[in-house]
Amino acid sequence: MPLHAGVVYGPVRSRRLGASLGVNILPPSEKVCTFNCPYCQYGWTASSRRSEAHVPAWPSVETVVREVTTALAALAGRDVALDRLTLAGHGEPTLHPAFGAIVDALRDLRDARAPGVALAVLSNSSTAHEPDVRAALTRLDERYMKLDAGDQDALRHVNASALPIARLVASLASLGDIVVQTMFVTDAAGRIDNTSERALAAWIEAIGTIRPEAVHLYTLDRRPAWSPLRAVTREFLDGVAGRVRAMGTKVLVFG
């Protein structure tokens, strides 16, 4: 998919979030993410840290508020109902240097212009150990946090990350009130695959440690960055869902 040129996109009819107005707080037309997932619909990562993106290119708090205000007014004029305002976009939204200030400003705007609409985030969880990010995450209504791996090997191959998996799991376990979202993928050569029994067992153990409110399971729905990747079957996802439910955790399957 092409990268977003501006702040607001949609509303998107999301498989997981209903009618969601996307809020992209990444630099326009530049993917900034701590992961470089081969399944990403936005292609490969250009920058991996806040400092690697040209600082003035990050949309300001004022710009975000102005663009979302305009979008909400337009949708209200067309009598379009929303379920969520979702911080997402073409990268990792928590990397924005003013992420906390944006969360607070959007909360105030939502309360004034769209009461009852949930304020959510889609995050890859890589910054959930940072105190300022954690504090901002707790001020959101909903936190959809990625966990595609339960061991270091799967994290390295599926998310192209060297982040310590133990720190990632611990940060999610202590965050509380989250929904874990997991993408399962494979390829014919087995180079990138989090579906093996070994990978699954480690992931199941991590879910048991985190104890999220719910788990969302899904697979490829759009063209990935790495073309040899393949979607898993619905039967596979249902089998994983059964193992998670056996632990007493709510599961939704998409795909």
Image: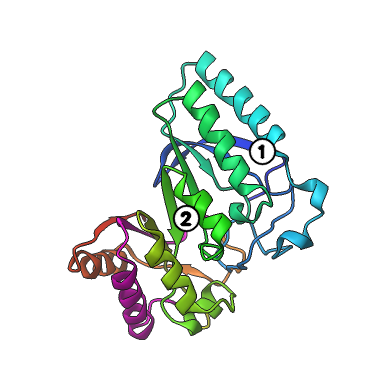
Q: Is residue 233 left or right of residue 223?
A: left
Residue 110 image point, x, y percent: 50, 29
Give the quarter of the image for residue 18: top left
Viewer-proximal residue among 153 and 104: 104
Residue 151 percent across, percent down from the top left: 44, 81
Q: Which residues are magenta?
A: 194-223
Neighbor class of circle 2 (other Cα within 10 Å; few <14, some 14-19, many 20+) is: few
**Residue name at image x 78 percent, y 57 percent:** 53
Q: Is residue 226 left or right of residue 242?
A: right
Q: Residue at x 34, y 67 (%)?
A: 210
Mark 1 → mark 2, Cα distance in angstroms:
23 Å
Using the image, determine if residue 178 lies above or below residue 62. Answer: below
Secondary structure at badge 1 equals loop
Q: Residue at x 46, y 22 (%)?
A: 80
Residue type at numbered disc 1: Val
Q: For numbered disc 2, what is the local secondary structure?
A: loop
Q: Which residue is mark 2?
A: 221
Label 1 Cα crowd, 10 Å radius (few <14 / some 14-19 / many 20+): many
Q: Amino acid at mark 2?
A: Asp
Residue 84 in sight in this render: yes
Give the mark, 1 or 2, whose residue is nearer the N terminus.
1
Q: Is residue 139 magenta?
A: no
Residue nearest the viewer, comparing 192 with 50: 50
**Residue matched to label 1:** 7
